Amino acid sequence: MIGKITKGSSGRTLIRYLFGPGRANEHADQRVVCSGLSVGIEEGRALSAAEIAGLGAAIDAANDQFATNPPGGHIWHVSLSIPKADRLIVDDEWADMAQRVMSALGFEGEGVQPAAWVAMGHGTSAGGNQHLHIAASLVRMDGRQVNIWQDRKTLSLVCAELEKDYGLTVIDGREGKGMPGLSRVELERTARGQWAEPPRITLARLVREASVASKDEAEFVRRLRRTGALVRARFEAGGKDAVVGYSVALKTPDGTSPVWFGGGKLAKDLTLPHLRQFWGVSNDDRKTAVAEWTATKTVAPGREALGGHPDDWRRAVAAVERSVERLRAVPASDLPAWRGAAREAAGVFAAWSRRLEGNSPGPLAATADALARSAQNRPGEPAPDRGAVRDLRGVAAIVAQSQLGRDSSIAWAMLIDQLGRTLRAVGDAHAARGETEMTKVLIDTLSPEIAALHERCETNSTQELAPGERTHEDRPLDWMSKNLPHQAKHHRGRGQSPSRGIGR
């Protein structure tokens, strides 16, 4: 969330502008979302010309009466905007945000005379982002001036809280951030390129999918490259034997230089040291991983190259169902367990989003991102516990690569139903801890969307749901022999199913 503050000398002029068409005719559906104690006006509807004039006069009234005339003007104007990729914010939520901003800045509160203010909503801006305007008087009803010393710093802190509480994209510079931070430059570049979302958000989801689906670091590197992401290692100073970090980028359609992001710039839990907590860390594992990091193409294909069998989907359903049953016994206060569940589920939804939604992220992507925020641990707290939800292990790998059968849509519907139960369980844990805004995101906003996707899977064929993929029955008989790595071919000749390597 970006908060921008300006000052002026006329409430009447500002209100007329905010209820007008805007400089680029971007103002639409202008309405009052909420207002201060000293401004009585109906919310949620368009205002008449007389009402607009009256509202402007009400904002100017205290300064007109007392002639306080603060330096720089008596009108304080703040705009709050969120990226286009964020979920839809309804007026009740905007109203809560406005109230929290105005209370934090001291325009209202216990023991002080209020100052007049009003919050107005529009449609989306010319760049497609949602936003809110607050127009306020710096003169209280008794003529004293509102103290706005360090107002920009205070507003930034409030925005950070709102980002966390409402599950919004975190902007660079916020203290204690865990999820991707976006700069103004990134937001503007995204708008100019008319991209569905900023590259940093896409990359965070790709990395999370690869990390959750992988058993070890070498597999992580191979999976990440298979998504199409560009990957490079950062080695310990003075050598090429120890990888201490990594960076990723998306290929550019016009051949220009890609923008690289280190793992820590995607999210604090996506740094290489953090990811290593969930993989094998033996010396052999490290050596194998270094070989993959330094190679320009895969050195030793592993289970990520196996085209799992369509029956894997039903195995995934059973695994998630067992996980949900186990979660029922986990106390809401067991943060590592719940964050572990959120982390694993985020990887599953990320894999499904890449496969089904592709370059048009929808509810699967939004759910993956929300669960990733739920999985973040604050400084000094224990890391997410993957062992507490061991049944979810391997499900992301199945979703990422298992083949489709003619009845896969039925298994998809069953899997979506169980994942929806997981989503609600995580949301209920947030509710039990009093974290109401994250509860709203997971249960009120995303759960209905996942339920709608469940119905689609029940009523549509696999080909309708994933028209770009061929089913197992449609593939040539020799597809497996051509695509399996050497080791898998060897085992297959001994009577073992190649799909056994997926999700184990």
Image (cartoon, helix red, strand yellow):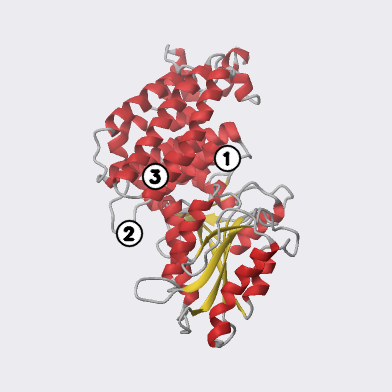
Residue 484 appears anywhere in the view = no
Disc 2 is placed on an element classified as loop
Q: Which residue is mark 2?
A: 379
Whichever of labels 2 and 1 marks the residue nearer the N terminus, that label is 1
Left or right of residue 309, residue 436 in this image: left
Residue 373: x %, y % from top left: 43, 49
Front-most of 176 and 479?
A: 176
Front-most of 200 and 280?
A: 200
Q: Nearer the viewer, mark 2 or mark 1?
A: 2
Q: Kindly indicate the quadrant of the structure image that contains residue 456.
A: top right
Q: Kindly indicate the quadrant of the structure image that contains residue 428.
A: top left
Q: CA distance from mark 3 to mark 1?
A: 43 Å
Classify 10 Å Cα crowding around label 2: few (below 14), some (14-19), many (20 and above): few
Left or right of residue 243, residue 328 in this image: left
Q: Which residue is mark 3?
A: 439
- Type of residue at label 2? Pro
Q: CA distance from mark 2 to mark 3?
A: 22 Å
Residue 420 appears anywhere in the view = yes
**434 up-or-down from 394: above or below:** below
Whichever of labels 3 and 1 marks the residue nearer the N terminus, that label is 1
Q: Which residue is mark 1?
A: 297
**99 up-or-down from 332: above or below:** below
**Badge 2 vs badge 1, beta-carbon distance below 8 Å:** no
- Type of residue at label 1? Lys
Q: Which mark is residue 441?
A: none
Q: CA distance from mark 2 to mark 1?
A: 37 Å
Disc 1 is placed on an element classified as loop
* Residue at image coords 37%, 49%: 436
* Residue at image coords 65%, 59%: 47
Left or right of residue 106, residue 467 in this image: right
- Type of residue at label 3? Thr
Residue 326: x %, y % from top left: 27, 30
